[in-house]
Image (cartoon, coloured by chain):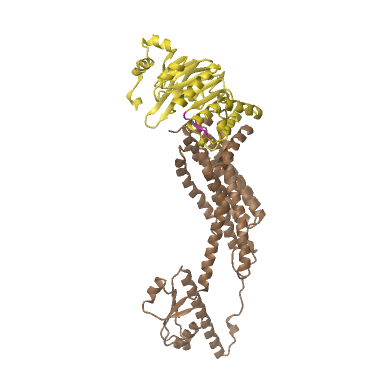
Chain colours: A brown, B yellow
Amino acid sequence: MSLRNIGIVYRKELTEALRDRRTVITSVVVPLVLFPLLSVGFGAMISNIVNKTKEQTPKVMIIGGEDSPGVVRSLRATPKIEIAPATPDWKNLVVEKEVPAVVEIPAGFDKSVADQKELAVNIYNYSGDLKSEIAAGKVDTALKAYRDSVVKDRLEARSMPVAILTPFEVKQHNVAPPEKSGAALFFGGFIAYIVVFLCLNGGMHPAIDLTAGEKERGTMETILSSPISRAHLVFGKFLLVLTTALATAALSVISMGISFALAASFRATTAQAGDEGMNMHIGLGAALSVFIMAIPLAVLFSSVLLMIASFAKSYKEAQSYVVPLIFIVIIPAIAAMLPGVDLNAKLALVPILNVSLLCKELVIGTYHWNFIVIIFTSTCAYAAVALFLAVKMFQRESVLFRS
Amino acid sequence: MIEARSLSKRFHDKKRGEIRAVDNVSFVARPGQIYGLLGANGAGKTTTLRMLATILEPTDGTAIVQGFDVVESPEKVRASVGFLSTATALYPRLTSQEMVEYFGRLNGLDEPTLKKRVDEIFDRLDMNSFRDRRCDKLSTGMKQKTSIARTLVHDPPVMIFDEPTLGLDIMTARSIISFIRECRDRGKTVIFSTHVMSEVEKLCDVIGIIQGGKLLAEGSLSQLRAQCGEEDLEEIFVKLVAPHYTSSEAV
């Protein structure tokens, strides 16, 4: 093993990579500029939509209730809803999202309440439509308040205290530190997903360019005629792919940390207090540990990418092999974001999923040292196998001179 | 000095089965001489030269290049060889000088020696005007000069040229030819392959005629003329090759 030779190849590949617009765009520009813009912009857009919808006064149609002024009055008194005149095609209007919610009051409702008989009030809404659900929620709250007032009246009529209905209170207290709430866990999973994805994405173009790209440009034969051994050549190339993969991941974590911190401070100055906004922030320690766990993963990705790409004859062929790999990598990374998927001894051995799950925990500041050791070593083992196979692949004539 | 000893290379092809690209080829190329491998397309020239340059490993047999066995110490063989073919392209994003320096370093030159060598070669080949220009911005002639500089940077005693003039315009091709001659005059062992008769007539001290992976005849031009009773090299070539030439290979 000659470090000098590997270093020569690495330095040359680095020089070329830094002059390659595509590498610079995917590894530097995308994580530093595009990605924070997208994530923060998208977040801002969603919260904007939710806030707007909440502030709107949705239309609610009341069907029936001509003989029940009591309940209608209580509905009309509800703040921030607008009562629309009843029309016979109300059901269609809900389906077509013209009217977000419709309340159907059965005939003789007030009378049956007075007689203490049971009758149902129906609310019709379009499930899944934000506007409709908010409207239905408001109507539901109004009706329940009205029901409570009826109960209260009945109790008072019998001169019983209202407290009879609630012999005891049940209270939930969240003692999880805010940075370990469900929202924070999801955010942790999201960070892990981004790191995993960008790690792969960052290594992809150089891996193809340095293998299939060389075959296509005819430089492969040139370099093979130099005295360097093929193993040294692959190691030099591998180190460059690893560098871009890690640089992409590191830059994206840094830029996300900064952009979320900026977004948080922006929210703090503008938005109202008590906003349930996610605790979106990464500590320096968490970022560093995520990055350390990303190293063996990046080694694994770089080796697999090199192995696959060196088999291809041309850049395009390599791309068609590598694109399916994106899905193979993304699915476990997405699975790690799902609530309820937590680390256990078995999952700690599943490549990619294990690192994603661990990163999720690391972001919220939990360190399961036994899992960290298992995951780090198993990923290193997978990475070593992949690197070994990549070197073997590169030494096969049938692969280097495929025609 | 190159000594091919029963060099053979077999490939496996899914459709055609086993292909004997090079079949039991033996010859000797001596220092200060130009050995020309003459053959049609697909005759086995490239595969033979690639084995000599250790880019491919022989299936059987071996070759001794400058005292080193191509199978046992391929890295030492490569360090004594300068290999140039139309397929050996340049790295587009490196400058002409960086390209030459890269190969100098890979050949184990230390920085002071490398600087001296590079300056010397760039002066000799008159390349200083495009020293810092990226290879993808060079003209064909400049590219060719850079390639030559790349093969010369470690001053190898053996030069292997695989169809070096293929696809080049006359002026560039001529400069390559004169470069090959210069290599011989400096006492290097030179082997080159071509299917252009005039190049062989002009350059070669020894001619090997290859077809179907087999070396059919070998000798100086006058020896081949005597052997075949023909004056024109093209006639000699056709006379030797025709019995071995199958229509499937012509495609």
Residue A76 in the image, given as x and y percentages of width and height: 48, 83
Q: What type of secondary structure mainly makes up the magenta span?
A: loop
| Residue at 39%, 11% in the rendered image | B225
Q: Looking at this view, is A343 or B173 the one in front?
A: B173
Q: Tell me if A381 is positioned left or right of A402 in this view.
A: right
Residue B35 in the image, given as x and y percentages of width and height: 48, 17
Q: Quadrant of the C terminus of chain B?
A: top left
Q: Tell me if residue A148 comes above or below residue A179 in the rendering.
A: below
Q: Tell me if B67 is positioned left or right of B85 in this view.
A: right
Is B90 in the magenta? Answer: yes
Residue A123 in which image quadrant: bottom left
Range shown magenta:
B86-91
Report whether residue B147 is seen: yes
Q: Looking at this view, is B125 or A85 the one in front?
A: B125
Q: Tell me if residue B211 comes above or below residue A215 in the rendering.
A: above
Is A52 in the magenta? Answer: no
Residue B76 in which image quadrant: top right
| Residue at 43%, 71% in the rendered image | A126
